[in-house]
Image: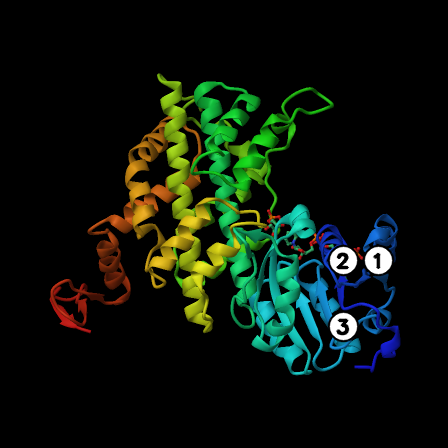
Amino acid sequence: MNEGASVTEAAANIGVVGLAVMGANLSRNLASREGNTVAVFNRSPQRTEALVAAHPEAGFVPAFSYAEFAASLQKPRTAIIMVQAGAATDATIDALVEVFEPGDIIVDGGNAYFPDTIRRERAVRATGINFVGAGISGGEEGALNGPSIMPGGSDEAWRTLGPILRSIAAVAEGEPCVTHVGHDGAGHFVKMVHNGIEYADMQLIAEAYDLIRRGTGKSPAEIADIFAEWNRGELESYLIEITAEVLRQNDAATGEPLVDVILDQAGAKGTGAWTVQTALALGVPVSGIAEATFARSLSSHPEQRAAAAELPGPARAIAVDDEAAFIEDVRQALYASKIVAYSQGFDEIRAGAAEYGWTIDLGAIARIWRAGCIIRAQFLNRIADAYAADADLALLMGAPYFADALARGQEAWRRVVVHATAAGIPAPAFSSSLAYYDGLRAERLPAALVQGQRDFFGAHTYRRIDREGAFHTLWSGDRSEIPA
Ligand SMILES: NC(=O)C1=CN([C@@H]2O[C@H](COP(=O)(O)OP(=O)(O)OC[C@H]3O[C@@H](n4cnc5c(N)ncnc54)[C@H](OP(=O)(O)O)[C@@H]3O)[C@@H](O)[C@H]2O)C=CC1
Ligand SMILES: O=C(CO)[C@H](O)[C@H](O)COP(=O)(O)O
């Protein structure tokens, strides 16, 4: 580490490294707050020059080397990194550690994989510099006007960072959408699950659109009106709102609905897969999130889709007698499946907190997701209420409000899944959410048979319903049972 430049050169109280969509807008957000002077740095100088030229009102302090960036910051220095996850983040942290000093704070605001954040926090802390992994959600508009922020890291770093992050975060019912989630990787863990829920929510909405289009023959613009109407009720959310916008958009080149000219292969940068991988390791069944993630993968294998195109099946058309009733069924199925997705996500956060020793206030997470982030929704108030009533809820969807909503919606949900299945319309997120609901409420599951099979081929033992202990049947002997 070097000593940086003299204090007299240090004009900025905060800095941002990485000036693509998120970093540029976050820098402008920071600069717009009273008392902030923002130093900006990007690996390629053109981005720095472009940002500074485009926004003279922001009073940015541009830097063209890491040493210059460090010198432009008041001590203790605070810098927020907004670069690509993975190697880019490691390279940026390494470069900052070289020019920062003990007591300074490095915040990684990108979508890092939480084990990386745990590793980085440990390594950077050893230098005396604070490292905070902070999930930031809201896309371009959120970064500019107020995102939802999920910081991890130490209590000491939070004391310094808290006021800055509160000043730039979205506000929901007077409360800034930021909370100290927990230590080291807790913030990025929660952001990861946020994105997993985002994948599920998006897939469910996409399935609802597909079913309505195939069931009623309505145009995308007409379905946009349906989503806009839904957005005035219990489904009110940013994702429903933007779905109406996307469906209403016509392609300038062809005049066709834009949704009909977009290639039907969904991309993914990895956070959904991380959510599922982590859930598998924790033994948490996030089946809705997993199906949503796999649905993107399935869409993106054109060679396999071409190979399967001639396989037999129904014509993917639903015969609907009562259009209005069918649309209402889809709405209810969407709401029920959405409850499942959030319940699964919160279950994963609860399990992750237990595994990694974080104290995560689940009600506070619901509250900071009410504004600023991509999954912001009226519905999150209901989740916050559920955790306020019982902070140790074993199952979010078992809370009275959600249990009632599921009870009200489950018949419609079943009708939609039956229709979809009979018509050969894939609705993996709707179907798997319903299977999860039925699985959890089942008095008895065929898991008993799986245990019998495991004991048969691998002497893995089983437990009995009527006695304590583990048992094994001598399958290749006289088939008597012995205590294991
Ligand atoms: N876009 C979004 O809606 C959201 C993104 N995020 C996360 O925020 C972060 C930034 O996202 P976004 O603004 O979309 O930008 P990108 O994820 O596209 O990252 C581009 C930035 O990373 C920099 N970069 C790439 N490789 C390196 C490297 N080896 N060393 C230093 N810098 C490097 C680029 O610099 P250069 O210009 O020199 O190439 C550029 O500033 C990401 O982690 C992303 O996952 C979080 C929430 C929402
Ligand atoms: O973090 C985000 C929103 O919360 C980003 O928009 C993220 O890139 C979305 O993930 P993907 O690109 O995999 O759809």
With respect to residue 360, does 386 lie above or below?
above
Query: Amino acid type of disc 3?
Result: Leu
- Mark earlier in primary sequence (1, 2): 2
Query: Where does residue 481 sit, x and y in percent of width and height?
Result: 13, 68
Residue matched to label 2: 31
- Mark earlier in primary sequence (3, 2): 2
Residue matched to label 3: 96
| For discs 3 and 1, the disc positioned in front in the rendered view | 1
- Mark earlier in primary sequence (3, 1): 1
Q: Is residue 329 left or right of residue 443?
A: right
- Helix, strand or loop under label 3: helix
Answer yes or no: is residue 319 visible: no
Label 1 near ligand 1 (CB < 8 Å): no
Query: Where does residue 188 sit, x and y in percent of width and height?
Result: 56, 63
Separation of marks 3 and 2 at Cα, in angstroms:
21 Å
Q: Which mark is residue 34?
A: none
Separation of marks 3 and 1 at Cα, in angstroms:
23 Å
Q: Which mark is residue 59?
A: 1
Image quarter in which the C terminus is found:
bottom left
- Helix, strand or loop under label 2: helix
Query: Where does residue 376 sit, x and y in percent of width and height?
Result: 53, 47
Q: Residue at x 15, y 66 (%)?
A: 477
Q: Are marks 1 and 2 in contact (CB under 8 Å)?
A: yes
When asked about the image quadrant of residue 6, the answer is bottom right
